[in-house]
Structure formats: C-alpha cells, structure tokens
Image: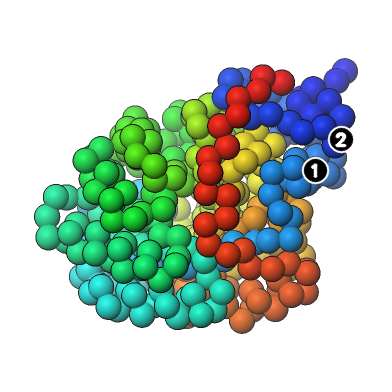
Amino acid sequence: MTSAIEKFINKVGKAVGIRYDWQKAEIRAIYDTPFLELIYQAATVHRQYHNPKQIQVCKLISIKTGACPEDCSYCAQSSRYKTEVKPQALLDKQTVANIAQEAKNSGVSRVCMGAAWREARDNSQFDQVLDMVKEVTALGLEVCCTLGMLTENQAKQLEAAGLYAYNHNLDTSPEYYSTIITTRTYSDRLDTINNVRQTNVTVCSGGILGLGENVEDRVSMLHTLANLHPHPESVPINILSKVQGTPLENQPDVPIWDVVRMIATARLIMPASDVRLSAGRARLSQVEQALCFLAGANSIFSSDNGHMLTVTTPCPGYDADKEMLNLLGLEMRPSFVGREKATTEVVV
C-alpha cells in the first residue's frame, strides 16, 4: 500500500506543492510513518523550501509580565495560580530597545515582544507598544508581538508601526481546547488570526505538546493550521515547561520521538512555513535538537539570561546556542529572509 508521504512526494527530489485541503486521516498517516523514513522525507521537503544551513535565532522579551486574567492551565503568568512569577508593569521603550540591541549583537534576527494580556486595549499602553515596534524595527530586526486577542483595527495599527509578525497560538485541538482554557474559545483564536490576515503582517501560530492531549489532538491541531489559507508563516512547536503552581505541573515529559514527529509532520504539510523549536528546548540535548533540525525545524529561541520569557521558562543562552550551531555546521539566519508569502496552490 502506498504511504501518505509517498503519495505526497511521489518521488524524492520532486518539488511538492502547497495545499490547503488536508484530511485528518492523511496527516495521521504521515505522523505514523516509520520514524527514520519520516525524518528523511521531511528533510527532503525542507531543502526544497529552505536553506538547511540556516537557523533563525529569536529573542522573546516579556514587556508586561504576570497578572493575566486568563486561566490557561500551563501558564505561569495567570493570576489564578500561585507561581514564582512576580507581576511587572509594561516596560519602557528604551529598556526594550536596549534588550533588542543586545540580542542583535548576539546574532538574533527576530525579537518577539509578549504582554500578559487577555486582549490588546485601545489605550496608552497599546500606543506604547506601537512605539516599541517602531523602535525595534528601526534596529533592522524582525519584530513579532503576542498581545492576546486583537481587533482588525489594532492589527492595522501594528502593521503601520512596522510589525513583521503576530503570534497567536492555537495551543491544541479544537476538541481538547476547553480542557486547558475556559476563559476564551477556539474561535476567538481563529478570529484574531483572521484579523491579522487583513494586513500584510505575517502569522505565527502553533501549539504546545504535553498538555495531556493524545495523538488525535495533535493531528487535529495540525489539520486546523494546515487548512488555513495561507498557512501561518511561522509554526512554533512548544514543549510544555512544567510550572509549579499550575494545574499541569505534574504532566509527564514528552518523549523526544513525539517532538520530532510533530516537527516532521508540520514540515511536510506546511512546507514553506518556518517551524520553530520554541519553549521546552532547554531540556533537549544537542543530539536531540539536531534531530529536530534534520526533521525541518529552522528556528530557535535563545536568551542572555537563561530564561525564555519568565523565571519559570528556562532557555539556552546565546553562547551555548552558538557553540551548538557551530558544532552542527549551521549559521544564524539574517532578518527578513523569505518575507514573500508562499501561496502557490498545487493539489498533489
């Protein structure tokens, strides 16, 4: 019987097209492909759309920390849970610019600014964020924001300020979502993505592994992302960072095999998208990370202080990541590579 991947690629070396009509059964068949064959085919497709020698290194800045009213079961910043996170007010523009400049000096080409808000409000704080976007964009960096839910008008204001990308993760499947979050709906997430799509700002949207979901939930999440037209330009694959005080603090670790399968499957069904190995990378060895890169991940988050976003989310440091990339013969990707959206629709 011909496998789903064989039907998709037909033969090694033949360029695959981008499609938006994926069926869950097809994605599940790809996910279940024998491990080494899955990696091989994902690596083949990766090379058709991306420079396999380049990894984009990103920096995440928490511009407003803690006291979020949402009840996301994994999040250290929720006001509903007792965690080590101390709420902090919105940072000033110069502080953010200084952090961004230091990151750029270390090879970072993309800075994501995150605020622990349910949604962006039309107020002075949002105006300050717009100024931050202008300031950091002027440094020659790709700027991504994650501010919660967003209206179409707010998305257009961010676009005018120079925003490159907006992050709004789906987290998990539509079916499992309400188990993890009750203070917003899945359709709220999709509405914000649609609002961003009314602009030229690129979309960054992925999910988290280790929330207690099953394989069908993972497939369902990928199905939702892969049937968006166009696909998100960035697809973060996060591994749960277990935080004491949150409902998910005792979740079992996600096996590396599952992480690699998710990356490879995402690469095959969304070939032009950047697949970002994001939260949870700190617990992976260099060898495990190399497997992720081989399977199609081409972006990581790095840090100057050992933390990705808050003290509860560890992240490898700039020096350690440079050492790893040098060891693997990889280089840091500059900003604004592949800005053009890949929208060629080919049914295969």
229 relative to 341, above or below: above
Q: Quadrant of the C terminus?
A: top right
The residue to which callout 2 is attached is 12
Does dot 1 land on a helix, a strand or a loop? Answer: helix
Instruction: State yes or no: discs 2 and 1 in contact (Cβ < 8 Å).
Output: yes
Given the image, on which type of amino acid does mark 1 rest? Thr
Disc ID at residue 44: 1
- Mark 2 surroundings: few (<14), some (14-19) or many (≥20) residues within 10 A: few
Circle 2: element type: loop
From the top left corner, tell me how far across and down residue 231 is, in percent: 52, 35
Asked whether 172 or 54 is in front, the reply is 54
Which residue: 57% across, 55% down? 337
For image coordinates 53% across by 70% down, the residue present is 108
The x, y position of residue 339, in whole percent, is 52, 49
Q: Give the position of the N terminus as an image quadrant.
A: top right
Q: Amino acid at mark 2?
A: Val
Is residue 74 positioned above or below 340 on the image? below
Give the x, y percent position of residue 109: 52, 66
